[in-house]
């Protein structure tokens, strides 16, 4: 990673840390997603790394979601290139990682930031962290979350979260099963370190084989689902309604649906 990269990769002992650092809010650009995917592949190939942590360097922000420049006025081919990286390349990198991954969410996670967090095996959150799927409010859809959120929280609760776009707390995310644990803000890093140490203390070979077996069992038709999610998102994002919603958000006015 270069010094101006939106992502850094560091390893301390057996723990690899991938850190998002694209100011001001870790909005997801194609460069950022590709850097995360490259870092995950680097961690997979690093024999000394037994656990991977995904975190943010920006206080009170995990990721605000997609950079709207990716969507506003862009042709479907450009949007598809971004979604290929976020929906498919990220998933494949996590699928083939071969070691546990932990998302450390210390602030707001929205839309594509949720995609990034829940791509990990375990999600730990600070008490002040907040979550949400705001795409509906700007005229687009969180298509990939249609594939997996109902499996986590159930059909009816998933529909409410996805189609209201409301923000929900870390405590509610824990109750829903979106995150594993919620701890005091000051304790998040220590809790991540404790869990990482537990994973790192296991047999690396057994973890690798066991995780591969686990991923095969939960995969089922998920790959087909995320492939169709790319088409669904592109179809909506290039519509007149979506473009109006995006322009309204940028211009800080109500959309004219």
Image (cartoon, helix red, strand yellow):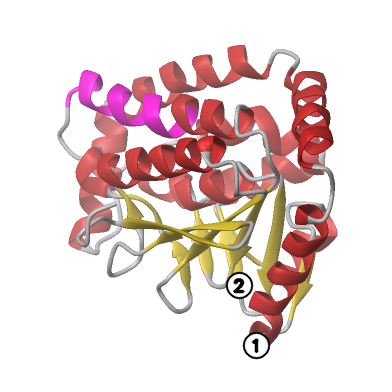
Foreground residue, 18 or 180? Answer: 18
Provide the major secondary structure of the magenta segment. helix
Local secondary structure at mark 2: loop
- Quarter where residue 250 is shown: bottom left
- Quarter where residue 47 is shown: top right
- Quarter where residue 234 is shown: top left
* Residue 193: % across, % down: 70, 70
**Label 2 belongs to which residue?**
129
Question: Would residue 57 be found to the left or right of residue 120 on screen?
Answer: left
Reply above or below: 168 against 239.
below
Which label's residue is closer to the chain start, 2 or 1?
Answer: 2
Reply above or below: 234 against 82.
above
Foreground residue, 143 or 29? Answer: 29
- The part of the chain drawn in magenta is 75-87
Q: Residue at x 69, y 56 (%)?
A: 123
Callout count: 2
* Residue 25: % across, % down: 35, 66
Question: Would residue 254 be found to the left or right of residue 128 on screen?
Answer: left
**Label 1 belongs to which residue?**
186
Q: Residue at x 48, y 33 (%)?
A: 90
The C terminus sits in image quarter: top left
Reply above or below: 7 against 46.
below
Residue 89 belongs to the span the image colors magenta: no
Question: Which mark lies nearer to you, 2 or 1?
Answer: 1
Q: Residues within 10 Å of mark 2 (few under 14, many from 20)?
A: many
Local secondary structure at mark 1: helix
Question: Would residue 138 be found to the left or right of residue 222 on screen?
Answer: left
Foreground residue, 241 or 43? Answer: 43
Residue 85 belongs to the span the image colors magenta: yes
Q: Residue at x 63, y 46 (%)?
A: 118
């Amino acid at each position: 990673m270069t010094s101006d990269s939106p992502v850094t990769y560091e390893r301390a002992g057996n723990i690899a840390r991938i850190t998002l650092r694209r100011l001001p809010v870790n909005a997801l650009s194609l460069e950022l997603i590709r850097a995360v995917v490259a870092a995950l592949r680097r961690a997979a190939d690093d024999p000394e790394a037994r656990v991977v942590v995904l975190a943010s360097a920006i206080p009170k922000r995990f990721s605000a979601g997609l950079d709207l420049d990716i969507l506003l006025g862009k042709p479907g081919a450009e949007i598809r290139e971004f979604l290929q990286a976020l929906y498919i390349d990220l998933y494949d990198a996590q699928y083939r990682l071969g070691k546990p991954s932990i998302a450390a969410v210390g602030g707001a996670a929205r839309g594509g930031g949720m995609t990034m967090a829940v791509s990990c095996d375990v999600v730990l959150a600070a008490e002040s962290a907040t979550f949400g799927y705001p795409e509906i409010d700007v005229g687009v859809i969180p298509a990939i979350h249609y594939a997996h959120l109902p499996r986590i929280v159930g059909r009816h609760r998933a529909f409410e979260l996805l189609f209201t776009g409301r923000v929900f707390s870390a405590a509610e995310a824990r109750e829903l099963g979106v995150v594993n644990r919620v701890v005091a803000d000051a304790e998040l890093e220590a809790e991540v370190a404790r869990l990482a140490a537990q994973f790192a203390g296991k047999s690396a070979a057994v973890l690798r084989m066991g995780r591969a077996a686990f991923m095969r069992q939960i995969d089922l038709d998920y790959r087909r689902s995320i492939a169709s999610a790319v088409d669904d998102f592109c179809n909506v994002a290039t519509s007149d309604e979506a473009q109006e919603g995006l322009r309204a958000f940028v211009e800080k006015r109500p959309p004219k649906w």
